[in-house]
Image: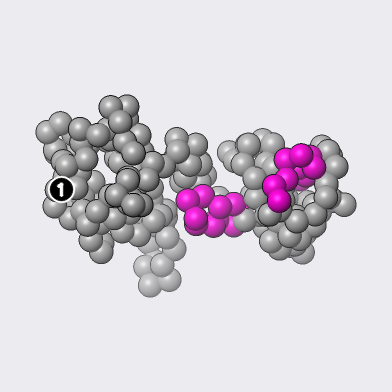
């Protein structure tokens, strides 16, 4: 539940209305702080060097609001609702927003090399680079010995490539009951 402190929340918008809602948040009095993550998307039909941007999460925009801005946010034209559960707005942790900002900022591929602890299906912690501190699952071994790493943020998965020097297999205590395998502490 939101309090007088500002927290991030997700807002569902009408189809293709994210940009319009963002503009209305800017024009609101007082303005509503928002974050609309965008991705450059390659379109084979367009031969321009400049890639068009599309929302990373179609029909969603993140807002940083407090309990006094709920009504203003809900009644903004183009907003369907603020994502909630059992009549309580679901707060999006700052670390999730930061992770999304990292993905948006990089928009490039990363690489990972195979080791004894880093095998397909294993969990790994990213130690450096744009995704430092995040954990992911190794999903595919590439021909060059690298891995595709699946990182989940807000129930969405992104697959990136990470260099071996940027990875560490998790210490056994870092694993939850749902994570497969037994690992020893191993810095790559």
Viewer-side residue, 171 vs 101: 171
> What residue is drawn where x is 76% and y is 60%?
120
Which residue is denoted by mark 1 in the rendering? 76
Q: State which quarter of the image contains the N terminus.
A: top left
Question: Could you say whether the residue bearing mark 1 is in a helix, strand or loop?
Answer: loop
Give left or right: position of 116 versus 34.
right
As drawn, the residue found furthest toward the front would be 86
Give left or right: position of 184 versus 61.
right
Q: Magenta segment range? A: 151-177
Query: Percent position (x, y) of residue 28?
Result: 14, 38
Query: Percent position (x, y) of residue 46?
Result: 37, 68
Residue 170: within the magenta? Answer: yes
The answer to whether 136 is drawn above or below residue 25 in the figure is below
Viewer-side residue, 91 vs 170: 91
Residue 106: within the magenta? Answer: no
Query: Percent position (x, y) of residue 83?
Result: 32, 51
Give left or right: position of 165 versus 32.
right
Viewer-side residue, 175 vs 140: 175
> What residue is drawn where x is 59% and y is 52%?
151
Residue 23 seen in this snapshot: no
As drawn, the residue found furthest toward the right would be 116
Residue 131 seen in this snapshot: yes
Query: Percent position (x, y) of residue 57?
Result: 39, 56
> What residue is drawn where x is 50% and y is 46%?
103
As drawn, the residue found furthest toward the bottom would be 45
The image quarter containing residue 173 is: top right
Viewer-side residue, 7 vs 128: 7
């Amino acid at each position: 539940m939101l309090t007088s402190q500002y927290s991030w929340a997700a807002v569902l918008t009408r189809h293709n209305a994210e940009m319009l809602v963002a503009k209305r948040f800017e024009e609101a009095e007082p303005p509503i702080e928002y974050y609309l993550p965008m991705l450059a998307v390659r379109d084979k039909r367009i031969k321009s060097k400049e890639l068009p941007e599309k929302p990373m999460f179609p029909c969603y925009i993140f807002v940083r609001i407090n309990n006094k801005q709920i009504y203003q946010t809900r009644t903004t034209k183009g907003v369907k609702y603020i994502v909630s559960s059992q009549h309580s707005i679901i707060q999006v942790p700052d670390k999730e927003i930061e992770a999304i900002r990292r993905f948006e900022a990089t928009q490039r591929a990363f690489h990972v090399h195979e080791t004894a602890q880093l095998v397909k299906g294993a969990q790994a912690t990213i130690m450096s680079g744009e995704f430092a501190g995040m954990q992911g699952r190794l999903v595919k071994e590439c021909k060059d010995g690298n891995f595709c790493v699946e990182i989940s943020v807000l129930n969405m998965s992104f697959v990136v490539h990470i260099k071996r020097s940027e990875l560490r297999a998790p210490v056994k205590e870092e694993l939850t009951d749902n994570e497969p395998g037994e690992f020893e502490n191993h810095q790559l």
